[in-house]
Image (cartoon, helix red, strand yellow):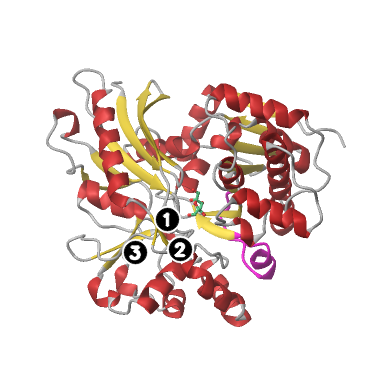
Amino acid sequence: MKPLHLAAIDLGATSGRVILGTWKNSRLTLKEVHRFPNSFQSLGGHDYWNIAGLWSEILTGLRAAVAALPKGATLASVGVDTWGVDYALVNDTGRLVYPVHAYRDDRTQAGLKRLANTRAALKRIYAATGIPNVFYNASLQLEETVATHPAITDLATRCLFLPDYFNFLLSGKMANELTIASTTQLLDVHSTDWSRAALDHFRVPAQWFSKPVLAGTKLGKVRALPPHPALATTQVIAVPGHDTACAYDAMPASPDGTDLFLSSGTWSLVGFESDTPLTGTDALAARVANERIGDGRYRPLTNVIGLWLLEGTLKDFASRPKSDADWAKLITAAEKLPAPAALLDVTDAALTNPKSMKAAIDAQLKKRRIPAPKNLAGYTRLICDSLGRGHADAKAAFERMSGRTFKRILMVGGGSKNRLLCQATADACGVPVISFALEGTAVGNLANQLVSLRAVRSIAAFRALFGPTLKQTIYKPAKK
Ligand code: LFR
């Protein structure tokens, strides 16, 4: 069989990448053709994404993917995944009619408190959507947009979440995709359509959305670049638009449901796959988000604050690591330190978007009369051990609610390369952590394109083929 070449556009909140995947003899090889930093920018007290800048990086990446193809080869397809919840409001021609805010903007704080304080509404919204009340929800963001700019309901005719928007720029087709729709707190937890109750509650116009398409839907040919023989037949495929859904699809999980998944990056996303959602009072109290898999099933998940803590803390240290060798040194130094006497409360809302992460951590410790670490190695150790505890709390809650016992934790993403974090997770959870040093999000993105192109039968078949080719590291839990 001829090799198949595909491009994954994978945008994270702190970095983006374009990866060229090649499928040959049932093996996937990856080549990173473009990587770039990403961050939101503050303007007049609000936080925004540089959308034009991201689009320009996407085009640079696509050109690099074409340039990296073997002579005469074509790109079969391209797919986009991004972080969750953020959106573009556009008119019929696709023109942006409102700036794209970043989810850490604190404009949702008033709405967050309002819903938290209205027990009946909170329960009703959770029963309808299966998504807890979290500051970044698109529901709260859209509620704030409509309330502060009422004319927006005339100006905008469509709400496209970021992968939907980039798919539109690439293909000219507007569609809402299911996994990204499931991050919003506006989707019906029992169907694959929008929740009228949630839309009405947050006063978000229902006509802004179309019934979400399932992953694998072909949207049309790439029309964003000048004609090129390699791009003449390239399909834009709606892959799971949510990066976390892609990361989960890449996990070489055993089919018996005993693996807990951890996608570790800016956020730690702990969860599992299920045919049914986890709802009810316990799930609401444990802040379980019933996000969706590309095929419509569920990924009950909790968001632990993740390496955002370390990314933020590093900014306050001139000695922060700049190369892989620096990182290795930092992790080794942190490992040698004694275990911290007390851990951070990683659920503290003050750590969400502080001006200085180090100052926010110090303030929490001071309040609890715990001495602050002395150096960067100390903070690194404290953060990794505290995240390990956060992962273990999530595991315990899932076991209690689902009646399952998780025998292993499968870990992908940037954090899976961090020995200290992997070991802290194994120790706190009491089960082995299997880390795959793998760009899970990009691999899941490519896997869904392969299924859509009928090169692979299903995600389960992809996992069975791809899993054994992966290098894995096993972290056994320390005996207590
Ligand atoms: C990870 C992620 C999380 C989501 C957070 C905000 O990149 O997509 O799953 O909850 O970003 O959207």
Report crowding for label 3: few under 14, some 14 to 19, many 20 or more residues within 10 A (C-alpha).
some
Q: Quadrant of residue 207?
A: bottom left
Q: Amino acid at mark 2?
A: Thr
The residue at 72%/56% (across/down) is 364
Helix, strand or loop under label 1: helix
Q: Compared with residue 476, is residue 91 higher up or lower down, i.e. above or below?
A: below
Left or right: where does residue 384 sit relative to residue 150?
A: right
Q: What label sits on residue 211 in the rendered view?
A: 3
Report crowding for label 1: few under 14, some 14 to 19, many 20 or more residues within 10 A (C-alpha).
many
Q: Main secondary structure of the magenta part?
A: loop
Residue 219 x/y as whole percent: 25, 49
Question: Marks 3 and 1, Cα distance to the nearest angstrom?
Answer: 12 Å
Question: Marks 3 and 2, Cα distance to the nearest angstrom?
Answer: 14 Å
The residue at 44%/72% (across/down) is 195
Left or right: where does residue 431 sit relative to residue 452?
A: right
Q: Quadrant of residue 145?
A: bottom left
Helix, strand or loop under label 2: loop
